[in-house]
Image (spheres, rainbow, N blue to C red):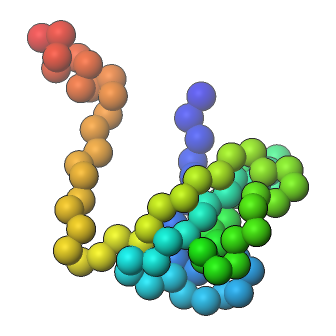
Amino acid sequence: MDYLIQPNSRRCAVTGKELQPGDRYYSVLLEEERRLVRKDYSNEAWQGPPAGAFSFWTGHVSTATDKIKPRFDDDLLEDCFRR
């Protein structure tokens, strides 16, 4: 089953503060109205995952100098490997 998860909002769900390049953040998936919703939290506002969190993880807002890792379709990559 595929899930459509929103990209990083770059805004803290608690404070409304815009996350800046290099800032550490926490992301949480919550079920709201029978769908998964992503909420992002600044490092300062993070108090742990909220009740009912489906999943959570941490990351950092990329900077202009960060290398962008290419994304691959796993099935396509496996098919190319097998060929």
Q: Is residue 72 above or below residue 61?
A: above
For image coordinates 44% across by 84% down, the residue present is: 20
In the rendered image, the quadrant that contains the C terminus is: top left
For image coordinates 78% across by 51% down, the residue present is: 53
Q: Is residue 10 left or right of residue 80?
A: right
Task: Name the outermost residue toward the top.
Answer: 82
Q: Is residue 28 above or below residue 42?
A: above
In the rendered image, the quadrant that contains the N terminus is: top right
Viewer-side residue, 58 vs 81: 58
Q: Is residue 21 above or below residue 27?
A: below
> How many numbered circles does the render carry?
0
| Visible residue check, residue 19 | yes
**Which image quarter: residue 48?**
bottom right
| Visible residue check, residue 33 | no
For image coordinates 64% across by 72% down, the residue present is: 41
For image coordinates 24% across by 52% down, the residue present is: 69
Q: Position of residue 78 (x, y in %)?
A: 26, 19
Q: Position of residue 28 (x, y in %)?
A: 67, 57
Q: Position of residue 25 (x, y in %)?
A: 55, 69
Q: Is residue 38 left or right of residue 47?
A: left
Q: Is residue 18 above or below residue 53?
A: below
Task: Name the outermost residue toward the left.
Answer: 83
Q: Position of residue 5 (x, y in %)?
A: 57, 52
